Amino acid sequence: MHKDNSMNHTAGNNSQLSTFEDEDHSEGSGDHSHDNNNDGVEKSGVFLVPRIVGILIFLLAGAGMAAGMYVLLQGESEDNFENQLTTFADQISASVDESFDHIHGLLTTLSTSLTADSLTTATINSTSSALPYHKSDTFDVMGQNFLEEARVPLVSWSPVIHGTTELNAWEEYSKLMVHPSGGTETYAPVWQTVTKQEDSSSANYNLYAQSAIRPNLEAVSETSLHSFSDFVDATSVYGSFRSSETEVFESLLMVPLLKNFSKTSTTVSGIVVAVLPWDIFFHHIFHDAVHKVDVVLSDGHCGNRKTMTLDGSQVVIRGNGDLHDERYTHLAEMRNFLSATTTHSDCEFSLTVYPSHEMMVQEEKIPFPPYVPIIAVTAVFSVIFVLYDVLLRRREQKVVGEARKTNAILSALFPAEVHNRLFGKGTDSQEDDAIMQKQAPESSKYRLKSYLANEDQKAKANEHVSAPLAGDANHTTVPGADMYNTRPIADLFPNTTIMFADIAGFTAWSSVREPSQVFTLLETVYSAFDAIAKRRKVFKVETVGDCYVAVTGLPEPRSDHAFAMAKFARECLVRFNELSKQLEMKLGPDTGDLAMRAGLHSGPVTAGVLRGDKSRFQLFGDTVNQAARIEGTGQRNKVHLSSETAELLIAAGKKSWVKKREEIVTAKGKGEIQTYWLHSPQDAMIEASQNKIAESQRMSIASTDSSNLDNMALEALEQSLPPKVLRLVRWNVEILKKLLQPVIAQRHGQATRRKGYSLEKREKELSRHKQCLEEVTEIIDLPPYDQKAYRDSRKVEIPPEVVRELQHFVCIIASLHRDNKFHNFEHASHVTMSVSKLLNRIVAPDEVISRRSGNDLSMSLHDHTYGITSDPLTQFSIVLAALIHDVDHNGVSNFQLIKEQAPIAAFFKQKSVAEQNSIVLAWDNLMLPKYSLLRRTIYTNQSELDRFRQILINNVLATDIFDKELQGLRRSRWDKAFQRMKTVDRSPLDDINRKATIVMEHLIQASDVSHTMQHWHVYQKWNERLFAEMMEAYQNGRMDKDPSLNWYQGELGFFDNYIIPLARKLEECGVFGVSSDEYLNYAMENRREWAKKGEDVVQKMVTKYGPDQSKRDSMSNGEVL
């Protein structure tokens, strides 16, 4: 019973529990049913508001996006249009400046030709034809050439007449009255005029009567500069010279007409005037597809305005005043132009570019109002959103039904935090964007441009980090291995023009120069090219030796790459010619004869940074190779063009710049190709003008009485010399000045100065000794080493009076040299340069300097060079001896002078005739009273005077290598000096001085024939000149045998028996350092070349200088076979 009761009790409890559970379940079911019923309502309420908000945001976003797109497009269109207008304004201003410079250059050339024509006519006829009393017979031809090249209607020239006296003289000369007076004492009557229409009504019309241009005329006369007038009516001066009556705007360009070419004289004898219609500056600036732009010309606050319209390549004159469309005033682009032009007035020219209405209509980029894209985009966005919402609601209803059944299970199975993670947000989109952006490839052109602009990146590119080689058990490290993990900085540039430019004759020129001189030339030239490249936005790639490489079209692409490179190459060529002439005074003979040779080719090129040690920007591809070949097949003073570059220039409207090369060029790997020259219209006129100048200068020298040279002032004497001789004079003066500085410095450092009897008396005694051969001595006593006398000479200043006397003396020496092919002043300067080079080499031999330092150095140099380096007067005397050793050389041998019984041969007793004559002439000129200050600077006591003369005599007479007696004496001195034979009573001092004497003589002997110990081209040039001189003597009956018959074998014998042994002696004496090896190597190489090529060279020289060619003077321009 108990058990049953218990069981019943348990059952009752279970039943009760079950009942509770059922009730709880019923209640729970009732609650869940309520929740689920409300779920749809809640979701509907929850989703409805976001939908409405979403729709509004979506629509607003679409409208905003549409409006933003319109604003951006409108702004971009306006920016592009303004940029285009700015480009037009820049292009117009640059074109006007370029056209003006072109016309100004042509007019200046015409003025120079007139001056040359006047000087030539005056020299041939009489001084009565000198400016201003001159009428050029060639002005009509030169003027017509100018009109065609400059595209202007009229050019004239007028003499400048001052005062009544000159006016009367002019009217008597011209047979016409000057009219009208103009109210001034200065007159500029129109004398010769060239127009496209015949008209002579302007003859002797006084330009000063025109008040509008009078300030310009006065400015030209006073400053010798050009002047550009304001707007004028040229018909008021020249009459009806135009071919039509259409309205034009005109100004006058005036350049001075100088009386002569002296740099110190600025006398304006006349004025050359050209009438410039303004429309010529604006023709063909644009191609025909460019729409109309209005250009308003203004002369500033002077108040004049002129308007014209550029319609493609044509120019339409609108009229006076500012006539542009005022609706577009806010788009004005103003430029000042002709900024470098001397106007001599308060008016400043400017131009303002406005778009025309036609241009605005054509260039309109957005033809619809702003509300159209807003409505369109909003409508599209609305349709998309509605469709999306319908589909989303259907999907939502299906999902909600399933969610009701599984919601309890999901809530019971997963905690809240797990649920949130399952349905939480993913990775931040901004982080993904950053990662993608980091991994995105960077523009190769941008990376290349950044590298070229960023020096820090270049430095980093050179850093090498060692990394283990993959798969290497020993962990071998490879420098810079990590850099290969990044892409190279490189790209293809399809449109470029490359220039290769080198210096023609550089290798031969550099072979006779000091290394510092070679680098001076290259640094000067390349820095000038760099400045031009920077200004013209040309990219310099590199320099390799004397080759300069540049490119246009990268890193910034440009459509005018060929045009820009052509202008750059032309300017570099002109600049090089200017610098080479200027540097000749510093770097010596033949520097002015160097010439640039350039080659241009256009095409695609691969460019990039070649990474590694000393990373460099490099160009690769066939375009580079072809540009190098175009340069290599070019000519001196010319820019060589490939057909590709020529076609681009012609397409750019520069057909006049391109001239077809007559001969076909054979290029490696390309076969025969047609090439072109970059041609400037000014080239022919400049060359003709230079020829006339040279002719007039040669005539002025020929007509100058040599007996009057000593009485000529320095300026007049310099003016009488040809330009190249004058440059050599100035270079020699600089060399002698640098040698005089240590002479003065040492003299100031000496504690005592030995004084003897009057130097004037000693000078007269020495001047009476005309037989210089009798003064040759075996030993020249050089002063002992004096450490106290050493002073730094770089701060020593030579008095200006002494410098002027030195300049005058060197000019006299140059004038005393005859116009021989070989034995002339240029040869003397070449010998001087060699002597100076060898002296510099023995002054500082590296092997001595490395063993000594401080106070011991100067003493070591003194001992090593036998006292030559410690006595500045000795060095000065050796160089001066080189300069005077061929004074008044007759162009024939001493043997011939003796045979002809020339007076100087009898005077000097048939011994070393030419050499003694040179010494006497130079010494007598130096002893003139006008050089007293120069002499007291060279020497101040008798000891210095005697040593100075002794060095001159010994060294000049050492150049007579065909006198057997002198040759035997020198051989004996050499054997004694360098212990090849024993001598009696040899003192240490005599031994040193004997060595010094023989070293000096061999130094000048080697320099006298230094062309045989220099580059093959140098040897060939001077060998040809010597052949031409001797052939001329033979043809004139001053030589018994035809020199060509034995020239080949004679040169071989000369090398074997004299040149090579002499070069070995330079090495044996041990004072010339590396120069002795250099001279010997060149001598042996030239001997080998002559043995192979000499017979052909002789045949060509015979053809060139044989009897039929005797009148040809091909040596004047330094040509070499």
Image (cartoon, rainbow, N blue to C red):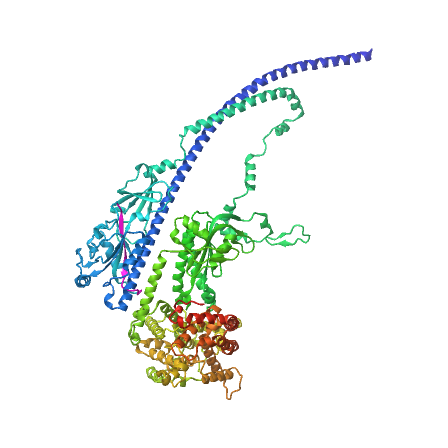
The residue positioned farthest toward the bottom in the image shown: 984
Taking the spot 39% from the left edge, 85% from the top edge, the residue there is 910
Q: Nearer the viewer, residue 540 or 795?
A: 540
Q: How many marks?
A: 0
Q: Nearer the viewer, residue 430 or 203?
A: 203
* Residue at the farthest top position: 1
Task: For the C terminus, give its image quadrant.
Answer: bottom left
Relative to 801, is 534 on the left or the right? right
Report the front residue among 632 and 463.
632
Quarter of the image where one finds residue 1024? bottom left
Q: Position of residue 717 (x, y in %)?
A: 31, 71
- Name the image quarter holding residue 874: bottom left
Q: Do we see residue 292 in this rendering? A: yes
Q: Is residue 648 left or right of residue 205?
A: right
**Residue 350 location in percent, x, y?**
31, 47
Q: Residue at x 75, y 14 (%)?
A: 14
Q: Nearer the viewer, residue 906 or 1107?
A: 1107
* Start-end of magenta stretch: 247-263
Quadrant for residue 774, please give it.
Answer: bottom left
**Residue 852 visible (yes or no):** no
- The answer to whether residue 844 is magenta is no
The residue located at (21%, 56%) in the rendering is 203
In the rendered image, residue 560, in percent from the top left (x then y), is placed at 42, 48
Judge whether 367 appears above or below 669 on screen. above
State which quarter of the image contains the N terminus: top right
Left or right: 631 as drawn, with respect to 92: right
Q: Please state the horizontal and vertical placement of residue 564, each as a whole percent of the image.
A: 42, 51
951 shown above or below 495: below
User: Going by the picture, which residue comes out furthest to the front?
Assistant: 1108
